Each structure stands twice: as C-alpha cells, then as structure tokens.
Image (spheres, rainbow, N blue to C red):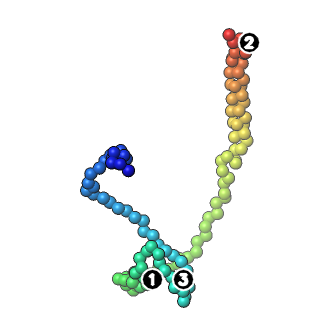
Amino acid sequence: MNRSRWRALAPHTGTCRRVSLYRRDTSLVFQAQSGQVYTLIGGNPKVEGANYDLAKSIQGIDEFTLPLVSIGPSTAIQHKEQISPWTERHSTLLWIILVLVVGTMLILIVRNLKKLPSFQERP
C-alpha cells in the first residue's frame, strides 16, 4: 500500500499518550475425568484448581457472638379473591367501543371516497 493511500485511510497520525485496555474475564468449566490428561490451549499453563474452602472466606466471624434466630409462630395468610383483569370484566364495553370506532372509520372513508372526482370529471 502506498503512503498516500495509507494517509487517506488513517488521517490522524501521531503519538498516543494514553491508552486504556479492557478485557472480559473468562473462565473454563468442564467435567474432568480422573486418570485423563488435559491440555490447556490459549490460557494460563500455571493455573491451579479452584479452591472452595469456605472456612477461609468467613475468617473473622465469631459464631458465638452472632444473634440467634428462631422460627416464629405460624400465622394464617388471608385469602384474597383473585380479581380478573379489567378487560375481561368489561369485555362488552370494549366490543361496543371497537364497533363504534370501526363504524366511524368506515363512515369517514365512504364520505371521502364520495368527494373524490370520478374518471369522467377529470380534465
């Protein structure tokens, strides 16, 4: 590629003083079979197995100073009658409104079609 073509493609040349790079953390999860040998391609060859030791993650919590919680007495939940949606309760009203709107639209369309000049009246 000649130099003039390169400058046309990249008109802003110069030094870059600040660059921020971002990447998304990825993970690999699979079922490992004992006795099998696996090779990690394109990752960190020094990676170790996951450590799910929960004792390390909650260090510093003294279980004897935590408040005790107990289950309270059972209380009956009040039954509320289910109310159907407004559109289902008033479906007749919706049908009347729909018929009126469609009728009004048909009247407007017929009136405007009558106002159009016929083919014989055109010059």
Say whether residue 46 is left or right of residue 103: left
Instruction: Mark 3: give few (<14), some (14-19) or many (20+) Cα within 10 Å.
Output: few
Please state which of residues 102 and 114 is positioned toward the viewer in this rendering.
114
User: Eyeballing the image, is 18 above or below 48?
Assistant: above
Image quadrant in which the C terminus is located: top right
The residue labelled by disc 1 is: 49
Please state which of residues 70 and 106 is positioned toward the viewer in this rendering.
106
User: Amino acid under label 3?
Assistant: Ala
Q: Residue visible at 69% across and 44% down?
A: 90
The percent position of residue 65, horizontal first and vertical second, equals 38, 83
Residue 67 visible, this angle: no
Q: Residue visible at 54% across and 89% down?
A: 35
Say whether residue 118 is left or right of residue 17: right
The residue labelled by disc 3 is: 32
Q: Secondary structure at mark 1?
A: loop
Residue 26, labelled with which disc? none
Instruction: Mark 2: give few (<14), some (14-19) or many (20+) Cα within 10 Å.
Output: few
Q: Earlier in the sequence, mark 3 or mark 1?
A: 3
Asked whether disc 3 touches disc 2, contact meaning CB atoms under 8 Å apart, the reply is: no
Q: Secondary structure at mark 2?
A: loop
User: Eyeballing the image, is 62 above or below 41?
Assistant: below
The residue labelled by disc 2 is: 120
Q: Secondary structure at mark 3?
A: loop
Please state which of residues 77 and 48 is positioned toward the viewer in this rendering.
48
